[in-house]
Image: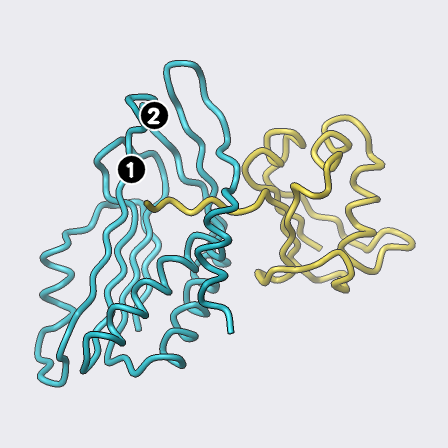
Chain colours: A cyan, B yellow
Amino acid sequence: MSVSVQREDFDVGLEYARFVAGRTDVGGVALFVGQVRAESGQVAAMTLEHYPGMTERQIDAIAAEARARWALDACRVIHRYGRLVPGDRIVLVMTAASHRQAALESCHFLIDWLKTKAPFWKYEESETGARWVEAKETDDQAAQRWRR
Amino acid sequence: MKILYFAWLKTKTGLGEEDVPQLPAGVTNVGQLIDWLAGRGGGFAEAFANRGLVRAAVNQDYAQPDTPIRAGDEIAFFPPVTGGVG
């Protein structure tokens, strides 16, 4: 299990290669990349603020929960912060397991929970000005799906 | 006790963080600390005007209004989180 919170971009191919290097026990890898989306040309840029220390702690806890619920061989999360523009990568989640179901489900679980548990706040700049983005109820609902 | 403010709570209070060496009188939990901070007036009153929009953490774990606090704790106030994916 490895978690990075960083300002720099990441290379998906390189991260994947490192993730599976030397492993023969893995049957499937699920990989999710989140990117900055330009909503009908509105968002010129956004800045992700986070709470250093708590961010890593919360992502570690979410990853530990995923490992407790699915038989995972490995798990990797990278989350960026700072100023980002449309098309930039924000987050990478990779999960590896012997079987596809565990890899796919745990990857989905991680990304849904990251949205509601990891302390990040989005400040959007557009043509009409800049504002702090409010949390969406649909994100809570997506995460609630995994509650049991 | 260290108090941290994030996102628009930082903008409204005008502070990223501050040290409060001792617990104010009558303050033993997060909710009471919010009352005390709001009582400063100005940007603090504004930041804590709608408590439904404010989340808190004590020592980097999510907290509730009745979560107890101690003098050495790190306490943070912020809006509901808006992670940056999809």
Residue at 52 percent across and 46 percent down: it is A137
In terms of sequence position, does the residue under pointer 1 or pointer 2 come before the other? 1
Please give the residue where the numbered disc 2 appears in the rendered image: A43
Pick whichever, A28 or A92, lies toward us.
Answer: A28
Question: Is residue A87 rendered to the left or right of residue B46?
Answer: left
Q: Residue A128's image quarter? A: top left
Q: Residue B37's image quarter? A: top right
Q: Position of residue A33 (x, y in %)?
A: 23, 51
Pick whichever, A39 or B18, lies toward us.
Answer: A39
Question: What chain letter is assigned to the residue under label 1?
Answer: A
Say above or below: B77 vs B29.
Answer: above
Q: Position of residue A38 (x, y in %)?
A: 28, 29
Question: Is residue B28 rendered to the left or right of residue B56?
Answer: right
Q: Which amino acid does label 2 sit on?
A: Val
**Contact, CB < 8 Å: mark 1 with mark 2?**
yes
Question: Is residue A137 rendered to the left or right of residue A96?
Answer: right
Say above or below: B52 vs A124.
Answer: below
Mark 1 Cα shell of 10 Å, populated few (<14), some (14-19), many (≥20)? some
Residue at 59 percent across and 42 percent down: it is B79
Q: Distance between the residues labelled 1 and 2?
A: 9 Å
Please give the residue where the numbered disc 1 appears in the rendered image: A36
